[in-house]
Structures are given as structure tokens and as C-alpha cells.
Image (cartoon, rainbow, N blue to C red):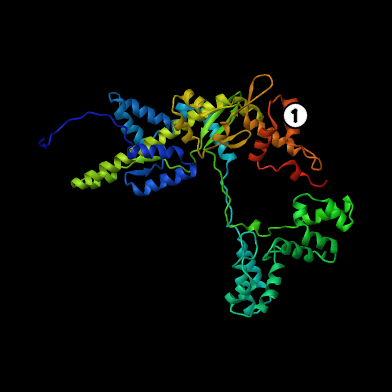
Amino acid sequence: MALELRQQLKLQQKLMMTQQLQQAIRLLQLSRQELVESVHQELLENPFLEERETPVLPEERLQHQEEDRPQETSDRVYDEESSRNADWEDYLGDFASAPRDYQQREVQEEENLSPVQRYAEKTTLEGHLLWQLHLSNLTEEETNIGECIIGNLSSSGYLQATVEEIAAMAQVDAEKVPPVLRRIQLFDPVGVAARDVKECLLVQIAERGMDKDPVLIGLVSNHLEDFEAKRFKPMMRHYKLDEEDLKEYMLIIQSLDPMPGASFGSSEPSYISPDVYVRKMGKDFVILLNEDGLPQLTISDSCEQGMQKTSQERSYCTEKKRSAVWLIRSLEQRNRTLYKVVESIVRHQHDFFEHGPQYLKPLILKEIAEDIGMHESTVSRITTNKYVATPHGVFELKYFFNSAVTMTNGSQLGSESVKDMIKKLIHEEQSSNPLSDDAIARVLNRELGVDISRRTVAKYRSMLNIPSSSKRRTLL
């Protein structure tokens, strides 16, 4: 059989993830801070993007559209006008649930409710201790030893090196390290640079002048594990204490700080800036997107006029301009999608926004997707790392999606509402007689009509990081 080459035409359809489509999907799942950083990065890299300094009023833009573009097609209108001006100012007027003047009053109120936070640089544990070290009356050699000790502390304030290792770092004899170590352990916070919890607590006891009490020293030195496990009776028999005496010792031990350096943690706190505000105005809820700090983009013509000389420059201009137009479109689509999702959530969870977390209903992504006519994956992406400010606090959008718990009357209640009820019951319980999981299940069934098992209560309690009743018991 002879071999031969042939040419064939084959027609087929493929779904391709273009770079522009990938960018649009990525923008959906970015948090607000990440979105602002991404837009600023695009402003630096794309010469066709620029930030508009003077926003165009909605009335002027609409008048301009009517005069200059009566015969243009919808696609061309979108490319030239929408991408150039981005419709940032008129966006809420088209998609909000209240009149425009109503929204302006709400924006002014939001500016008053959300002031700019200014805070100084956070003091670190190392800096705080070095400041005290250099103010102390120590020799140059002792200061060098102290710096080596402070440089080997954990974030909780514990020493992570042995005396011999510190001596080797400072190039001194080992017997010169303990006096400096004891001096540092009395710095603020007291107990820092201890090698274990017992030493940390004993230093604090000695600093308070309580080290003459042998019972207190014995409890800290030998029975910390018994305190953690709530094994009180063996300690009472060993030291011949009654319940009131043991309570007094417990109060003293609980007043001590087992992690003296934790308040100087090196990790900075994370600040949440809501992506959406939901405020009640009269009988309705008004939805406002938070665009504070987000640049208002427009297309720059100066770059294109100065670079179209060679074919490479024209190709570069075409590519960058297309990328700029697509970015502005993607940002518009992201805002539209976010608004529609929040608007649908407000409709489904109206009782929550009206009365609070106890009235949160079961909700899944599919219900919101069907309501707004989008795919579930789109709803999942747009609710990732997004936060909404409500009359009852700031919540992540995924908080409103939860499973159902059946009630005795046949209706259903959201699992987040049940978790909130469990947290409230445990907060109000007596510390000496905490509620067991079975008792919580009975209370929920009797008072709230929630048909829930003990195992489900234990699961919800574990998700809330609440210990069991035996570990919540303070004493006997």
C-alpha cells in the first residue's frame, strides 16, 4: 500500500479561554483591595489607560449621547462611549433601587459613617524590649548578651535558645548569661524571655511578691495540666484546700499572662473594607457599591496620536487599546454582577436585613443564579472575598448561603441562625454548670422549635471554636 499526503478541511467548534476572558473571570473573584491594586498596576503598564480627574455628570453624559450618537450601532456605542467614560457616575442611577437624589444623600451619609482610618506603625516586641535594654544601666558586654537574648524570642515572648547558645552568640562565658536573662524577664511585659510556661508564670508571681506562698508555687509548678483538665479534687486533697480557697488561687493564676509577647505580635491586623453597603431607607433597602479608592478609568488619545508611525507601533497601540477597553468593560460587568447578586440576596434574606441573624433562611448558590440568570460558578466567584455592610454588622457574602435545619412545624431555618442561637445560649449559661450538647438540643427544640440532634449541636459548636461543657466549666 502506497503512502501519500492529503489535505482535508474539517469544521469544528471549540470553546477557547482567551486572555481577555481569563482576566474578566479573575476580576470577579478579587477582593476589593486586590481589585484596587490590580487596577493601579494596569494604569502603570498600559499607556492607553488613564484616571479621569473630573468626573462627567450623568446629565451631561446623557445629553452628549443624544446629540452626537443618534445613528451609531449598539456595539460601537459600547466600544467608544462606554469604554471611554466607563459609566462610573451613572452606574448606580441605572441599577439602584432608589431615586438618584436619594442615593446622593446616602453617599454623603456613608462618607460620614466610614472615615479614613489613620494609625501609627505598630510597636514590635523586639523593639519594645531593645528600647528598655538600652535605657538600663548595663555594661556593653551585658547589653550585647541582652541583644542576643531578645533576638531569639518567639512571637509569644519565649526564649528559643539555650544559655550555652546565647553565650556562643555573644562570645562570653555561659555563667554571664543568666543574670542578664533574669533582668530581661522583669522588663515589660513581665515574664518575657522565659523558657516555658511555668518559668513565665513564676517570674510574674515573684514580681508581684507572692513567691512566699508554697501552695501557689506548688500549683503553678506541678498542677498546670490538672487545671487545664479541670481535675480539681486531687489538688484540693493534696494541699488540703476547700472550694473557696482553690477559687482564690485560680483567680490569681488566671490573672497571669502565659504569653506575654502576644500583644506585640509581628503580624499586622487585617482590615476589611466592605464592597457593598446595604442601608434601610424608609421601608426599602438601598444598595450602594463601595467605589472609594477605585480609579475612574478612561482611554487616553495622546498615546495613540504620538506612536502610530511604524507597523510595530500601530500593532502595539491596537493591542494595548483593546486591552484597556476590555478592562473597563470587565470592571463594569463585575459591578453589574455584584450588584445583581447582592440585590437578589437582599430579596431572599429580607428577614435577616430586617431583624438580624436569627432570621437567616436556607439559601444555595443555585437559587441566586436562577434568580439573576447567571451560572452558579459566576455567583460563587463574585461572592468570594466580598463583604457587605448591613444594619447588623459586616458579613462575608458567603455567610448568607447556608444549609437548612428542619423545624418541628415542617418549615426550615438556616444553619447560621442555629449557630447564632447556640452561641447565645452558651454565652448566657452559668459557668459553674455549663450546658451539654444534649441540653442545648433540648432547649432549641423546646423554645425555638428546631428539630436538631446532639451530634449536630456538637458539630456546630466545634465550627464555632467553642469547647465542650467539661472544658467550659470553671470550677466543680
Position of the N terminus by quadrant: top left
Most foreground residue, 387 or 417: 417
**Residue 274, picture quadrant:** top right
Q: Which residue position is annotated with label 1? A: 442
- Taking the view exactly as shown, the residue that stands out farthest to the front is 1
Residue 190: x, y in percent? Answer: 72, 64
Indicate whether 158 appears above or below 112. Answer: below
Task: Tell me what residue is drawn at x 14 percent, y 33 percent.
Answer: 7
In the current view of this chain or complex, which residue is farthest to the top? 409
Tell me what residue is drawn at x 75 percent, y 52 percent.
228
Say which residue appears at 37% left-offset and 35% top-offset. Answer: 329
Q: Is residue 401 above or below residue 298?
A: above
Front residue of this view, candidates 287 and 13: 13
Looking at the image, residue 314 lies above or below residue 239: above
Total numbered badges shown on the rendered structure: 1
Q: Is residue 50 above or below residue 8?
A: below
Q: Is residue 215 left or right of residue 185?
A: right
Q: Position of residue 30 (x, y in %)?
A: 46, 41
Pick the front one: 64 or 333: 333
Helix, strand or loop status at disc 1: helix
Where is residue 401, by image quadrant?
A: top right
Q: Nearer the viewer, residue 82 or 111?
A: 82
Q: Is residue 195 visible?
A: yes
Percent of width and height locating residue 336: 44, 31
The kind of residue tagged 1 is Arg
Is there any visible trace of residue 56 in the rendered image?
A: no
Q: Residues within 10 Å of mark 1 (few under 14, many from 20)?
A: some
| Residue drawn where x is 59% and y is 53% of the image | 119
Residue 160: give x, y in percent of width and height.
Answer: 62, 65
